[in-house]
Amino acid sequence: MPSTTQSPQISLGPVLYYWTREHYADFYREAADWPVDIVTLGETVCSRRRDMKLDDWLGIGRELSQSGKQVVLASQTLIESEADLRDLRKLCDNGDFIVEANDQSALQRLSSARLPFIAGAALNLYNPATLGVMARAGMQRWQVPVEMSREDLARLIDDCHQTGVSQPCEVFAYGHLPLAWSSRCFTARRHQKPKDRCQFVCQQYPEGLALRSQEAHDVFTLNGIQTLSGACQDLRHELSAMTEMGVSVARLSPRATGMAEVVNAFDQARHGKLPAPDPLALVDAEMCDGYWYGRPGMDNSRTQAG
């Protein structure tokens, strides 16, 4: 099985929620000083979130690049209109930063233009044959589907190396797991508003709207047209195992507050500095790691072990 001697890089994924311009600016100003190697920018969820334009993301990207970060621009995951396609073409042709392709439209645009790209998790890449096709099309790195177990991933990485596919992979290591996208906006529906007149109510929930069961368990997190897991995945105790497997990047999904502490905890973990015992209480939320261990996604192995 392939093994690396270097701990995974830490990447900061795109902000999945809808924040104000000031919040984005403050967040990335602080992120410039965090021990992250890669920062992915852009609106990946809803085209109606128009506070930030492409030029705004490019400006932030240039500032982060000057701070030594590798910058990636992420495409929207669900393309619904010709306007979305026009914005996608501008994003792919930005000329400054590599693009993370999160749907087939972006993949087609980038590969046709012979531009290098990052393959997003929503592309659902599960086998070495597909990854080989993507590599020949210009893929530089690929993201592991969030529901893939560590055993399946280890086999896939091994199979890729045996077939000559050496592009690095990225694991979603922290945050509410992106599970599904819909043409309907569930947050607007919660407020009894139509999607096209939503009044941007999702901006009231900078970390999403919790959907709880009758037993008061966090089942899902609603984020406009996106559905996330209710519990927050935390795989920082798995960074050493990722190193042995050959995982190159651990992705952290931004949250509205306390993200500096999350980044520092992962930075310490990748250098072998894990406190013990550690309840993984980085956030006031239920934790999960079930998918990683081949079980239902909302399971928490550390709670069950205790």
Image (cartoon, helix red, strand yellow):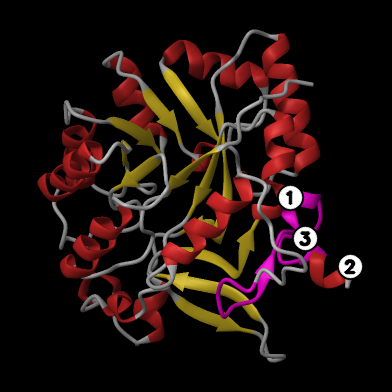
Question: Circle 3 sits in a helix, a strand or a loop, which is it?
Answer: loop
**Residue 287 falls within the magenta-colored stretch:** yes
Camera-nearest label, 2 or 1: 2
Residue beneath label 1, please?
292
Image point (52%, 41%), residue name: 121
Figure label count: 3
Q: Of the residues shown, which amino acid type is indicated by label 2?
A: Ala
Is residue 190 or residue 158 the one in the foreground?
158
Residue beneath label 2, please?
305
Q: Of the residues shown, which amino acid type is indicated by label 1?
A: Trp
Dot 3 alpha-carbon crowd within 10 angstroms: few under 14, some 14 to 19, many 20 or more: few
Is residue 149 or residue 133 the one in the foreground?
149
Considering the image in quadrants, where does the N terminus appear? top right
Task: Residue 305: name its quadrant.
Answer: bottom right
Is residue 94 or residue 285 the one in the foreground?
285
Q: Is 248 left, or right, of 71 in this rendering?
A: right
Question: Circle 1 sits in a helix, a strand or a loop, which is it?
Answer: helix
Q: Of the residues shown, which amino acid type is indicated by label 3?
A: Pro
User: How would you classify the magenta stretch by its main secondary structure?
Assistant: loop
Mark 3 in CB contact with mark 2 (< 8 angstroms): no
Residue beneath label 3, please?
296
Task: Residue 139: name its quadrant.
Answer: top left
Is 223 placed above or below 38 here?
A: below
Is 221 placed above or below 14 here?
A: below
Camera-nearest label, 3 or 2: 2
Q: Is 60 left, or right, of 252 in this rendering?
A: left
Q: Residue furthest right?
A: 305
Camera-nearest label, 3 or 1: 1
Residues rendered magenta in the picture: 281-301
Question: Circle 2 sits in a helix, a strand or a loop, which is it?
Answer: helix
Residue 47 horizontal/vertical position (percent): 25, 56
